Image: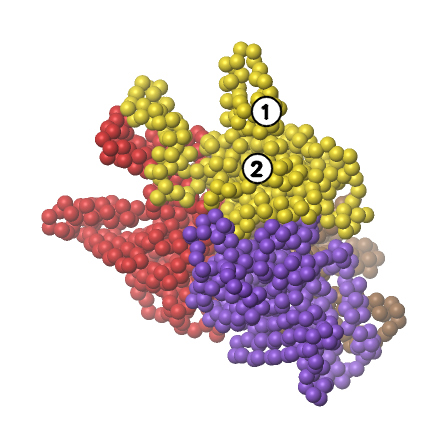
Chain colours: A red, B yellow, C purple, D brown
Amino acid sequence: MSEKKFLPLTDLAIEVGAILEKDEDDDIDGIDLQIDTFENYKKTHIEVFTEEGEEIIGKPIGHYITIESEHLKENDPEIHKEIIEEVADCLKGLLPTHTGTLKVLVIGLGNRQATPDTLGPYVCDKVLVTRHLAEFVPDAIDESVCHLSSLAPGVMGLTGIETSEVVKGVCDHINPDCIIAIDALGARSASRINSTIQISNTGISPGAGIGNKRKKLNCETMGCPVIAIGVPTVVDAATLINDTMDTLIESMLAESINTEFYSMLRDLGDQEKYSLIREVITPTIGNLFVTPKDMDEVIMYLGNVIANAINIAVHPGITIDDVNKYRY
Amino acid sequence: MSEKKFLPLTDLAIEVGAILEKDEDDDIDGIDLQIDTFENYKKTHIEVFTEEGEEIIGKPIGHYITIESEHLKENDPEIHKEIIEEVADCLKGLLPTHTGTLKVLVIGLGNRQATPDTLGPYVCDKVLVTRHLAEFVPDAIDESVCHLSSLAPGVMGLTGIETSEVVKGVCDHINPDCIIAIDALGARSASRINSTIQISNTGISPGAGIGNKRKKLNCETMGCPVIAIGVPTVVDAATLINDTMDTLIESMLAESINTEFYSMLRDLGDQEKYSLIREVITPTIGNLFVTPKDMDEVIMYLGNVIANAINIAVHPGITIDDVNKYRY
Amino acid sequence: MSEKKFLPLTDLAIEVGAILEKDEDDDIDGIDLQIDTFENYKKTHIEVFTEEGEEIIGKPIGHYITIESEHLKENDPEIHKEIIEEVADCLKGLLPTHTGTLKVLVIGLGNRQATPDTLGPYVCDKVLVTRHLAEFVPDAIDESVCHLSSLAPGVMGLTGIETSEVVKGVCDHINPDCIIAIDALGARSASRINSTIQISNTGISPGAGIGNKRKKLNCETMGCPVIAIGVPTVVDAATLINDTMDTLIESMLAESINTEFYSMLRDLGDQEKYSLIREVITPTIGNLFVTPKDMDEVIMYLGNVIANAINIAVHPGITIDDVNKYRY
Amino acid sequence: MSEKKFLPLTDLAIEVGAILEKDEDDDIDGIDLQIDTFENYKKTHIEVFTEEGEEIIGKPIGHYITIESEHLKENDPEIHKEIIEEVADCLKGLLPTHTGTLKVLVIGLGNRQATPDTLGPYVCDKVLVTRHLAEFVPDAIDESVCHLSSLAPGVMGLTGIETSEVVKGVCDHINPDCIIAIDALGARSASRINSTIQISNTGISPGAGIGNKRKKLNCETMGCPVIAIGVPTVVDAATLINDTMDTLIESMLAESINTEFYSMLRDLGDQEKYSLIREVITPTIGNLFVTPKDMDEVIMYLGNVIANAINIAVHPGITIDDVNKYRY
């Protein structure tokens, strides 16, 4: 997990919305924004389709979809089913069109030994793996399944190898048509933890960096489309404090307690304020992270939603009715 | 774990120290304070021995010992050995004097399913359990071991039973001479996490409360002395924010940026400020906790230190040379 | 788990069946046998209702129900639902009739650290615990739930305390109307592993014995009815060898290869043969056990079936439609 | 784990010994056998150094070393230290001679989800990983460490990818000087379980096979020397039964109960007898495995011995005195 790597898609959507609002014509060249609010979740779909759009938004050409639902944190199998279908539909829309059997490589990024970072490996363990059957016992499978393989490459701090090197090495040997990479992300706000699934087809940067030469997993580096699925599962201490102070100050402001302190902090600008807080807390609590108490359970909810959505999206013969088979 | 239950022994020591300093005569009736600073750890021993002392200090008559060491967080077996010997000595001093074989019941408080709360159960699994041998195969053991049993009673949220009821029920049947209860605590300050072992002979209040009728484990309720060993392993989000804001404000104060905000907060008093922060953060992040990234490993260090110290303190034939046998 | 403790209910049923067959009148005084074969499982219900029946069958008066299904080993949520309903019905029939809210204590026997023995503790973690709510926040619950508490008392080898002492101690404090005790059993035959759920209302003997004074959990010792739910999850090496040799010899016999070896073994009688095998293998492999490769997964299937069945049987407001909520 | 893949080094040694004995001249061209018996372990070192030797022994040119000790199964840190030093010495002798910093890739074969198969991944997690530091923060390390990376590639049944493909892919990117691959093996005899460490420099065949095209990890396939470290941790049910029947029959033979059954089995030959047993047991218990009850603990002993031995062998600055740092 990284403090930096999150795709701030929701923020992006809000930002895009703000730009759109300002713009009287209600459209930006090269960017589409669609927001759909359902009873149990909200879907935000941004498409960047021209270089002009890229420049305005600071994101490469591609699709950026966010599914938001507080129900993701709860043990609610019925609502999870709805979200699985939505995520599966989103994935289907991003998969390469293809005649014949699709070859998919699922990559579970993250560290199996740190609970909030186990989402990726957990999904790897739950998707229906078939590639070896196709190779060694072809009679055992039919056209109801694609050729799926999965790998949890570990994190560089424990392996000594950049994740992208492991994945690239495997790709070179098995030549998938498409990679689906799952990762737990650092949230930009405590309120987003475990309630957002972010999907894009422009790749992902695995892991927190020692140094800053981390290589992205994307079409260019891997040689095939990379669909990224991310869920914010932790927030760092500095972000938490930052958010809380904002709320605190705002509530005081509302009560007309204007203060030099407030003015000073506001003048700093968001990034400077965050940096100030990080600097203050680093020596003591630099290695602390903030996570919900019931994280183990919620990882299972999220992992089951994502694994089922992948199974339905990539295997022609698996449907929403099979959902309980891939929950354990 | 509870936000409230920690024995703020270090704070107590500081407080007592402050009172002692003010008091020219350098002594308070009924209270003894001894601080020993060693190369690798610091030991603070407060004894309250009269009712007068009880009243001044707000703590029942008894011993309150704190071992502080940053090395507890690190994989340093040699320094851990030193601390094991110190903790074992402290425990020996608190065990009931006894002729014949001691009957000890080790209680591991906490929830096996939440990493920072697994310390108690972990210690239960590591101490050398012998009571059943004494009963069923007496020839298998000799006087080198006492009669030790251990129990991890779970937490009320998962069992539906107050921890004290479980322990009392078991005590009634096995009649130990002494209980040693281990628990992970909520820290009052992020800097204390995993670096402090607190020992007292005045009992412990298990777990966080739904309601406030939680019963203490102590000599009165259990019918035998209760030695408590506690280690702060988490800090709640409000405490973390509170601490950081204090540091932030102080650093601004140092730069002569006096502010209304600061004045306002200072005027609130510590408890009010904490409550204000709690109130602000509750809706969003009420169920978040703050814990180090390497918690799984550190629990092992702490658990091994405590389990070894107990083994050495209670079993006559186990010495510091056996320390590696009880590390796994 | 014990090599000896299993309730050989299926064997009992077969035995009873054999006796019934021999008996022209097709009934035994004091014993009822009912076998129902469904598409996906088989249910055998023996009732012993007189002392005469007790003597013939060597089992105390009570109900002995066995649900057998190979599907218990498979990830088949639909069939599991059928079995859950059947087990829930069986349990309902054995619960004390009661006006007002039932107080149930679920006991999860077994060792959390040995996979095939984790069934009991797993069920404890999955049942809906409510007793503490009734006590501390009565407004939070209504008549849709009974007062359920749960405890995993550990195994004597790790706690030094007889399981019955722990349970009795807790019972004395919380006075349940009924205990439901779950345990993983040693199977008498490899083919029974993980495919049989045994239910009786005559209690259970926890754990493997050092010595032979192990106390039963039953109405007499606990002061309330004890419903036992057991699943054979391992077979000891000697049993496995015994079974295999029988099969081997029979297959040779079928091919008319009568042998002295065979004759000798047959002459020994079952118990002697088993003892001979145990004697031969003990030095080398006495501590080996035999278990399926996918045990972790199967424990989840079994645990979810049993936990759901208990929830439905004891909580008036929980039905088969809630089954997916208690699967994680 | 595989029933077939074990390097039957001990058997080989016995065989070679037998050949040597027959041969009056006491030497075989192209094969060296050295057996050293120490107080706490036994070391057998076979070197095949000519093609003639290859042919006689049926093994490629290389070194085959076995360390045998019942103490590996026990919690005996002092004896483990001795074995660590011996294994480290063996490894040093097999590492490529090299000027400059060695680049080592540790491969932990096996399935993280099946206890007896976790040895490889466990070792991966315990060795001191440094390669990423060398790349990203070269100032953080010095010549006291080599460049070590580690990878647990999973098993084909869960990933859909042949292990050799994953390892080859990674090798192509990071170009190690040497691979050290650790795997849990299937034992040929129950008595060998967990008491033997096998080391060779001729590679290893990962995993049990669906199909039989499994590719070896060796110098030829990987492009660098592959040192294999294997420990037998399970025995399959058929082997167990086979061994026991042998013992049983021998004991009867000793009592002069010669039997047709015995004669028949003897006449079958070892492989046929084993096949017969497998055939008989397959339907019911084909997926059972036999493993010691305390496997979780023993995996830690073995894993710590091997990880420490690797650390000492490859990192110039790590010595036997650091052994407790890499035990957790």
- Say which chain tag 2 marks: B
- Farthest residue, direction top: B24
Which residue lies under the disc numbered 2? B204
Which residue lies under the disc numbered 1? B51
Give how far apart the Cα atoms at labels 2 and 1 are: 20 Å
- The quadrant the N terminus of chain C occupies is bottom right
Horizontal relation, residue B170 to residue A243: left or right: right
Residue visible at 47% across and 59% down in the picture = C145
Which residue occupies the foreground of this view, B195 or A79? A79
Which amino acid lies under the numbered mark 1 shown in the image of this protein?
Glu
> To which quarter of the image does residue B264 belong?
top left
Residue visible at 53% across and 60% down in the picture = C102
- Farthest residue, direction left: A24
Mark 1 surroundings within 10 Å by alpha-carbon count, few (fewer than 14), some (14 through 19), many (20 or more)? some
Q: Position of residue D318 (x, y in %)?
A: 60, 36
Looking at the image, can residue B124 be seen? Answer: yes
Q: Position of residue D268 (x, y in %)?
A: 74, 74
